Amino acid sequence: MPLSTIISFEADQPVVASYTITAGDRTWQAHTRSSAATDQASLFKPNHQEVLLRFLPDTEHRIIVQITNAQGQEINGVRINGVRVI
């Protein structure tokens, strides 16, 4: 049964995030999303809490987070507040 993970972080400016997840020989991507988003600009926000899907039990996963601001610049040094498997 696949598991979910919640990842949260806070940036000092509005950003979007993309996630590359690797487990063994499997790699997949996830992106900032919002069911309330009516346009691309509304996806940019400083505080993020994302649910990432398709995690496997008893498997080591690697998550690479790429954070980009509204000007298209990659942002470094954002502290990840937590990763929780649910």
Image: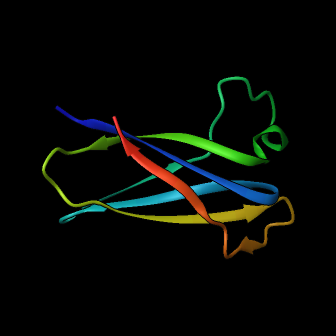
Tally the numbered discs.
0
Quarter of the image that includes the N terminus: top left
Q: Residue pushed farthest left?
A: 58
54 w.r.t. 37: above or below: below
Q: Is residue 27 shown left or right of residue 25?
A: right
Q: Residue furthest top?
A: 36
Q: Residue at x 78, y 41 (%)?
A: 40
> Which residue shows up at 20% across the image and 45% down it?
56
- The x, y position of residue 76, in whole percent, is 68, 76
Residue 85: name its quadrant: top left
List x then y, in percent, for residue 66.
59, 66
Residue found at x 84% / y 43%: 41
Which residue does the image show at 33% across and 34% down from the upper left? 86
Q: Is residue 49 left or right of residue 2?
A: right
Left or right placement of residue 20 versus residue 4 in this view? right
Q: How is the image coloured?
A: rainbow
Residue 82 location in percent, x, y?
A: 50, 52
Q: Which image quadrant is residue 10 in?
A: bottom right
